[in-house]
Amino acid sequence: MFAAVFAGIVVLVILFMGVSVYNGLVSQKNQMDRAWANIEVILKQRFDEIPQLIEVIEQYASYEQNTLKKVIEARNHYSAANSIDSKIAASNEMSMALKGIVALGEAYPDLKANQSFVQLQSRVSELEGLIADRREFFNETVTNFNTRIAQIPDMFFANMLGYTEKPMYHPPASETTRPSLKMNIG
C-alpha cells in the first residue's frame, strides 16, 4: 500500500514538473517570438520609407547609382527573406546601405538642403535607433530561450518539441568596429 502511494506521488511530481517545464518553454518561445515581431514592425516601417528616400535622392543625385543600387538590393533581399537568419542579414545589409545615403547628404549640399530628404533621413535615423533598442530586448529573450533549452530537464522537452537554438540579432560589423584614431604628437 505504501509503495503504491509513494509511486503515485512520484508520478504526480514528475507529471507536474513536466507540465511546468513545458509551459515555461512555451512561454519563453512566445516571448522571443513577440520580441522578433516587435522588431519586424520597425523593419517594415523602414522598408516602407525606402522608396520615398530613393525618389528624393534620384532627383538630386542621379549619378550616385551605386549607392541607390545597394539600397534597392538590400530592400529586395529583405522582402525575399523568409527566416529570422535571412531577415537579420538583410536588415544589416540595409543598415549599411542607409549609411551610404547619409553620406550622400554630406557630399551634396543641395540634397542636404532638401526638406524632404532631411525629414526622411531623420525618420530613418529614428527607426535605426528603435531597431537597436528592440534588438537588445530580442537578444535578451533569445539568450534566455537558448539557455533554457540547453538545461536539464528542459532540454528533453525542448527536443521533443523540436525547439532549437535561435540566432542573436547582431548589429552590422560597421557598428561594432571602432575607427582607428592615430595621433602624431611631437
Image (cartoon, grey):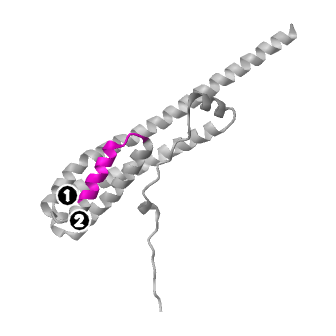
Q: In this view, does 147 lie above or below 61?
A: above
Q: Which residue is drawn at 35% across and 59% down?
A: 96
Q: Which badge, 2 or 1, is on the more N-terminal residue?
A: 2
55 and 16: which is toward the camera: 55
Q: Main secondary structure of the magenta part?
A: helix
What kind of residue is marked 2? Gly
Q: Mark 2 points at which residue?
A: 105
> How far apart are the alpha carbons under marks 2 and 1?
8 Å
Q: Residues at badges 2 and 1 in contact (C-beta under 8 Å)?
A: yes
Q: Residue at x 16, y 54 (%)?
A: 55
What kind of residue is marked 1? Phe
Q: In this view, does 67 lie to the left or right of 41?
A: left
Q: Is residue 87 left or right of residue 108?
A: right
The answer to which quarter of the image holds residue 172 is bottom left
Q: Is residue 44 left or right of residue 161?
A: left
Q: Mark 1 points at which residue?
A: 117
Instruction: Kindly give the residue lying farthest to the bottom in the view shown.
Output: 186
